[in-house]
Amino acid sequence: MKVTEEDILHIAALSRLKIAKEEEKNYQEELDKIISYMDILEGVDTENVPPTTYALPMENVFREDEPKDSLDRELALSNAPEVEDGYFKVPRVLEES
C-alpha cells in the first residue's frame, strides 16, 4: 500500500478533520485506490492532445461597466439569519490566540 496510516493522520491534521480510529483503514484504502488510478492516468499518451479547460466551448460575454444604485441595506439584511450593528453576523471562523 502506498498510503500509510501516518499519511492519513497527517492529511486529517492538515484538513483539521477528526477521523475515527475505525475509519482510518477505509480512508487509507480509498486514497490508495485514487493514487493508483492517477498512476494509470499518468501512463496515458497525451502528446498530441491539446490542453482544455472546459469540456464545452466557452466564450466571455463582456458588458459595459456602468455604475448602478446598490441594494438597500435593510433589504439586503432582511433574510439574514442574524444581524448585528447593520452587518451580517456569521460564526467565528478563526480561533483567538
Image: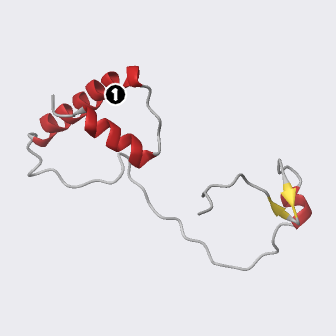
Point 30% across, 26% down: residue: 30
Under mark 1, the amino acid is Tyr
Outermost residue toward the top?
22
**Quarter of the image holding residue 55?**
top left
Q: How many marks?
A: 1
- Give whichever of 18, 58 is nearer the camera: 18
Say which element carries label 1.
helix
- Give whichever of 3, 39 is nearer the camera: 3
- Give whichever of 63, 1 is nearer the camera: 1
Relative to 16, does residue 37 appear above or below in the rendering?
Answer: above
Point 33% across, 54% down: residue: 53
Classify residue 5 as left or right of residue 82.
Answer: left
Classify residue 76 as left or right of residue 2.
Answer: right
Residue 74: horizontal and vertical position, in percent? 91, 62
Point 44% across, 26% down: residue: 20
Residue beneath disc 1: 27
Number of residues whose C-alpha sits closer than 10 Å to that of mark 1, classed few (under 14), some (14–19) or many (20 or more): some
Q: How is the image coloured?
A: secondary structure
Q: Quadrant of the C terminus?
A: bottom right
Q: Quadrant of the N terminus?
A: top left
Relative to 85, does residue 92 appear above or below in the rendering?
Answer: above
Residue 93: horizontal and vertical position, in percent? 62, 55
Relative to 80, does residue 23 appear above or below in the rendering?
Answer: above
